[in-house]
Image (cartoon, rainbow, N blue to C red):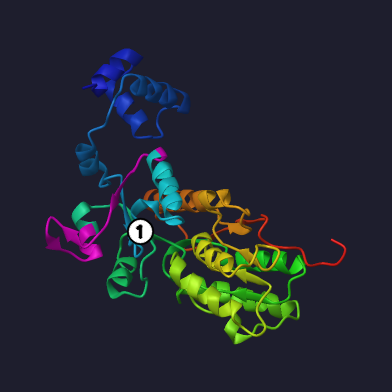
Amino acid sequence: MVSLKDIAAACGVSASTVSKALNDLDDISEKRKAMIRQKAKEMGYLPNMAARALKTKMTHNIGVLFIDDYHSGLTHPYFAPVLESLKTEVENLGYDITFINKNVGGREMSYLEHCRYRNVDGVVIANVDFTKEEVVELVESDIPVVTIDHVFNNCLAVVSDNIKGIRELTEYVISMGHKKIAYIHGQQNSVTKVRLASFYRTMEEHGLSVPDEYVPEAPYLEAEASAEATKKLLALKNPPTCILYPDDYTAIGGIAVIREAGLSIPSDISVAGYDGIPLIQQFQPKLTTYAQDMSGIGKAAAQAIVDQIERPKSALVELIVKAGAVMPGASVRCLNENE
């Protein structure tokens, strides 16, 4: 194993100078730090993390609390890319990640207890029931916390711009001449609440009414539920000309029902999804959707939690909003005259 003395000999400096460079201390030049770090990397140096933790009181370990209600593991169409980006950036910044749960070696622990057991420096929380007491307990603890797609008053949050996302997607459909627009929304949570409000507001601003039957609920990622909701919309006396779905996967369930009814997309009815999942973009006709900046969200969350850990005195409780973009496909028909 390569030691500090080995690196010092190779660089022609003292072991204490090597230690200062690797610990980013200020009393040596940036040029010398870079030279020593490069040599350490070339020699395959790995720091003794246990010794470093004792000295710095930091483990360079970040907890990730992620509850997968859909049993998709790390293939979740939205959160998998977010977590992969988070992991990559955390590692680039010199940290590892540990997934937090309630069962450690057969012993039941609260999330906070597990974090203390693993001695994590901070925690990123995503896709959980943020109203649960044990989640709130963790958020209100002295451990630095960053949440994804949920806002608390006392910790930093990184969120997708759901207000802008639904507004821009709805406005795109309106620009294509549609006035009768239905929105199958996900189950009630903070994200759904914001998206629904943005949808209603956008329609209202364009002078368009939304019948109650145009806004059925179908849980995220549940194609069967969206298929059932689509059947009910198609059976209406005054059906919509376009249906917005809560996510790209549920749109597939709706599309199947539309085709079973002998209807063509977009000739007979238009559809649009949400998320911008690459796999779904291979379907025909190409799905119009709103692509969330999943990579940007994960990277921002990683940078935010490391900033809180390393610079606690200057860390701010703020909201970091990451915008996406409409991806026009071939699933929304243009109803405007002469177009």
Please say if 259 is above or below 206: above
Looking at the image, the residue that sits furthest to the left is: 106
Quadrant in the picture for the C terminus: bottom right
> Is 178 on the left-hand or right-hand side of 137?
right
Is residue 170 visible in the rendered image? The answer is: yes
Determine the image quadrant of residue 32: top left
Q: Secondary structure at mark 1?
A: loop
* Tag 1 residue: 144
Task: State the extent of the magenta-drawn residues as a range.
Answer: 92-114
- Find residue 124 and report its horizontal and vertical position in percent: 37, 57
Looking at the image, the residue that sits furthest to the front is: 262
In reply to whether residue 112 is colored magenta, the answer given is: yes
In reply to whether residue 8 is colored magenta, the answer given is: no
Q: Return the residue nearer the eye: 252 or 327.
A: 252
Q: Return the residue nearer the eye: 127 or 20.
A: 127
> Is 23 on the left-hand or right-hand side of 50?
right
Determine the image quadrant of residue 245: bottom right
Q: Return the residue nearer the eye: 255 or 200.
A: 255
Q: Return the residue nearer the eye: 129 or 259.
A: 259
Determine the image quadrant of residue 325: bottom right
Q: Residue at the location (45% across, 72% down)?
A: 225
Is residue 12 visible in the rendered image? The answer is: no
